[in-house]
Image (spheres, helix red, strand yellow):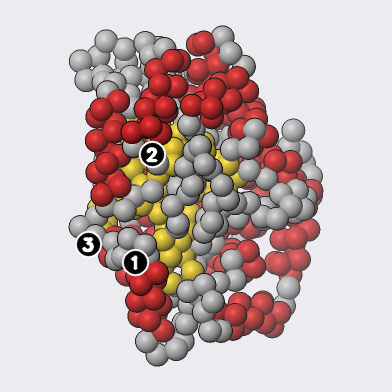
Amino acid sequence: MIDRASREFRSYVELYERASLLELGSLADQARWQVHPENVVTYIIDRNINYTNVCVADCKFCAFYRRPKHGEGYVLSFEQIGRKIDELKALGGVQILIQGGHNPYIPFAWYLDLMRYIKRHHPIHIHGFSPSEVDFFAGRFGMSIEEVIRELMAAGLDSIPGGGGEILVQEVRDRVAKKKAGADRWLEVMETAHRLGLKTSVTMMYGLGETLADRVEHLFRVREVQGRSGGFTAFICWPLQPEHTELAHFEKTDAVTYLRTQAIARIVLDNVPNIQASWVTMGPKIGQVALRFGANDFGSLMMEENVVSAAGTTWRMTLPEMQRLIADAGYVPRILCPPATRPDRGPREGRPQEGLPGGDRRGGAVGGAPRIRRLAHRSSRHRRAVRGRAVERARRPARHGASARGRPGGLRRDRQRQERRSPRGPHPQGVTCGSGSGTTRTGSPREKAGSSSSAA
Ligand code: SF4
């Protein structure tokens, strides 16, 4: 239970509400450099596969789903899914984000067979089934959350996307997604997954008529769970895409709101390692700016996205374009290494989303506010010193391909070095990517809106 009357809570709401845009950005940028002192921005190539668009949840903000018996409803066959994975792999992709609607006609054995089929015939990291889907499976098939996750893991599930989080305040969910997992249940699924050894991403879709305090409560609740479990690898937020939905009369929020929201998330979530920029919903230029507002990850270069595109948002880019955008913003682009796939899942080398050492070290809901108050009241000289040390570290001879920002030709050499190191060589130039959202950091269709959006 979040105490909205606490000093800490009120101080964050006040900061979010009253600080200037640049002040918020500066604080978020400091927090980013403290967590990620290297001048690197990561990204991943994956594909959003929506196995079905049939859904009975009737979320008011969703333009993707079709009711049962609708002529446009579909369920993909295993072979169709396999072909999509092969296409992804041919382009250097390392992960699928698989999620779908709450389809009452699919038996649980279908999901398990699908996992086994993928691992047997098209092995790849499976980032799948948002908490809302897991909750739907549990209710539909008379199982506990733990049983559902255990069975999916045994069949091949590698991690869980943070889709369907929207705003984790029940009154807000009751207005827009009444039939879907509630706020407590959504977090329960995530915490259970973490306890069973799965990493997950976490999302926030705002612009649903909630208050700033509701958004801060969402962040507090995430931080609280992370303080206990340490299993969230990345956070991504994006605004409601209202076109073609029941909420089409809602005003679309602007880029300033996005930057402020991402910044406050970076500041509050001091125990979540990665923040992803949602260029898919905000466009590439705001995506670049977001890298100075707390984001250290450019999300996913997705081959396919069906959810935010159904709501009229269609930002796409090629891989070279993504790398150029990151470099032009002053960072070294670094593709994430392929995660190990089951059954030989080992340490996921190269994945920066493994959680901060000591998931609870930063203290959950009681640790953050004093920390940010300290940040907020540090002298500008101190802030410059912190930033200077981080830049200095980035300028040292690169041990891990770290940036040589400031050295003539440094970025170019970094890119060349990165390409030489890549086991696949330079990536194909024709890869296009769809909607963003959190990579394992990955999520439901909506999680992909962010990179990793939320169908489900
Ligand atoms: S967001 Fe997901 S759960 Fe909600 S209606 Fe769309 S597909 Fe169904």
Q: Which residue is mark 1?
A: 323
Residue at 38% x, 25% y: name it: 114
Residue at 40% x, 54% y: name it: 44
Callout 1: SS = helix
Q: Which sits earlier in the primary sequence, circle 3 or circle 1?
A: 1
Residue 254, above or below 285 = above
Q: Which sits earlier in the primary sequence, circle 3 or circle 2?
A: 2
| Residue 298 in the figure: left or right of residue 187 | left
Question: Disc 2 marks which amino acid?
Answer: Pro
Question: Disc 3 marks which amino acid?
Answer: Gln
Q: Position of residue 94 (x, y in %)?
A: 38, 48
Q: Nearer the viewer, residue 203 or 238?
A: 203
Q: Which residue is mark 3?
A: 429
Location of residue 29 by image quarter: bottom right
Q: Position of residue 275 (x, y in %)?
A: 53, 55
Q: Which sits earlier in the primary sequence, circle 1 or circle 2?
A: 2
Residue at mark 3: C-beta within 8 A of ligand 1: no
Report how many numbered discs are placed on residues in the image.
3
Q: Quadrant of the N terminus?
A: top right
Q: Nearer the viewer, residue 274 or 374?
A: 274
Q: Position of residue 170 (x, y in %)?
A: 60, 27
Q: Which residue is mark 2?
A: 123
Question: Disc 1 marks which amino acid?
Answer: Gln
Q: Nearer the viewer, residue 259 or 48?
A: 48
Residue at 47% x, 74% y: name it: 401
Callout 3: SS = loop
| Residue 170 in the figure: left or right of residue 208 | right
| Residue 130 in the figure: left or right of residue 26 | left
Q: CA distance from mark 1 to mark 2?
A: 27 Å
Which numbered circle lies on residue 411? none
User: How many residues crowd mark 3 within 10 Å: few (<14), some (14–19), many (20+)?
Assistant: few
Specify whether residue 9 is in view: no
